[in-house]
Each structure stands twice: as structure tokens, then as C-alpha cells.
Image (cartoon, rainbow, N blue to C red):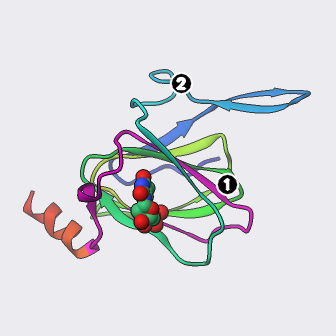
Amino acid sequence: MNPKIKVKNSSWIKFRKFSEKKGDLFVGELNRDLPFQIKRVFFIENFNNLKRGQHVHKKNEEIIFAARGSFVLTLDDGQIRQKIKINNPRFGVYLGKNLWREMSGFSKDCLIVSIASRKYEAGDYVHSYEDFIRAIKKK
Ligand code: TYD
């Protein structure tokens, strides 16, 4: 069972799985399974035991999942910090705005796929955890 997501602005996304003799197919379709229109997709592999992520998006929303292998996703909404093991291609995590995320603990075969609501904008990132917390306190 997937653990309950306790941080704000995040939830599980369930892809539909079609298992047949010829193999397994996973699908996520706008409105039915996915909460936003996709503008960008990126994959990450060949990890080096170095943490990835470590930022907040001001506007961009994402869905992140392990298409293969596993990793640990750390989420922090400024009040609650939660670590979630991601190890099933059927289950992604929705990452809303203003949510600190880190990825670590990658399996050798890990392939992370991320789908995003906006094109790449360097100015949409907050790279400092302290700045993120400061911005939340001002609200
Ligand atoms: P980075 O944001 O550091 O990855 P992560 O958050 O997973 O640790 O991105 C690595 C590099 O890729 C960085 O130079 C920016 C570039 N990049 C793009 O050009 N477009 C994109 O959509 C993304 C996600 C990254």
C-alpha cells in the first residue's frame, strides 16, 4: 500500500495498467488520470549517489515517477517533511507549486520520468531552502 501523502500540494497519481501476454502498458490521460496539460517531459538516469532536485517551483507543476527501479522522494511543504519510496511505475506523485523536493537513494537501474505543466524557466526555481521557508513565513 502506498503511504498517505501528508504534505500540502501533493498527491498520488495512478496510471492505468493494461497487462497482457505481450507485456504491461501504462497510460495517463488528461482529466481522467492527469490533473494538468503537459508542456514538457524529462527523464533522468545514470545516477551518481548525489541528491537531485533540491528546489521549489513557483508555478510549474509536475508528476514524477520511476518508470524503472526505485528512489526516495523527500517532500517538504515548509511544515511537514515526508520521505516516500517510489518503486512502482503505476504510481506517480503530483508535485504542486511551492513544494520542496529532493530525490535520493536511486537503484542502479532507476529511470525517473517527470512530466511538467510548464516549459523550462530558470526563473521559476527557488534553489535555497532558506529562501523557500522565508517566503512561506511572509504569506
Ligand atoms: P536540474 O534542475 O539541476 O536537475 P534536478 O533538479 O533533477 O537535480 O537540471 C539539470 C540541468 O538540466 C540544468 O543545467 C538545467 C537543465 N534542464 C533544462 O535545460 N531543461 C529542463 O526542463 C530541466 C528539468 C533541466
Residue 72 magenta-highlighted: no
Can you say whether 100 is above or below 89 in the image?
below
Residue beneath the point at 39% across and 31% down: 36
**Left or right: 101, with 64 as reference point:** left
Q: Horizontally, is 21 left or right of 85 in the view?
A: right
The location of residue 51, given as percent across then percent down, is 50, 74
| Residue 130 sits above or below residue 6 on the image | below
In the image, residue 115 lies in the stretch drawn in magenta: yes
Q: Amino acid at mark 1?
A: Asn
Say which residue label 1 marks: 87
Question: Is residue 3 found left or right of 87 in the rendered image?
Answer: left
Kind of residue indicated by mark 2: Glu
Q: CA distance from mark 2 to mark 1?
A: 21 Å
- The magenta stretch is 101-129
Looking at the rendered structure, the secondary structure element under dot 1 is loop
Mark 2 closeness class: few <14, some 14–19, many ≥20 residues within 10 Å: few
Q: Which residue is mark 2?
A: 29
Residue 74, can we see it? no
Of 100 and 5, which appears nearest the observer?
A: 100
Q: Quadrant of the C terminus?
A: bottom left
For disc 2, does the CB lie below 8 Å from ligand 1? no
Outermost residue on the top side: it is 32
Please give the name of the residue rendered at 47% of the width and 30% of the height, measured from the top-left corner.
34
Where residue 112 sits in the image (x, y, percent)?
60, 55
Residue at 57% from the left image edge and 29% from the top image edge: 28
Sequence order check, earlier mark of 2 and 1: 2
Q: Say which of 109 and 6 sits in front.
A: 109
| Total tally of numbered discs in the picture | 2
> In the displayed image of the protein, which residue is found farthest to the bottom?
49
Residue at 22% x, 75% y is 130
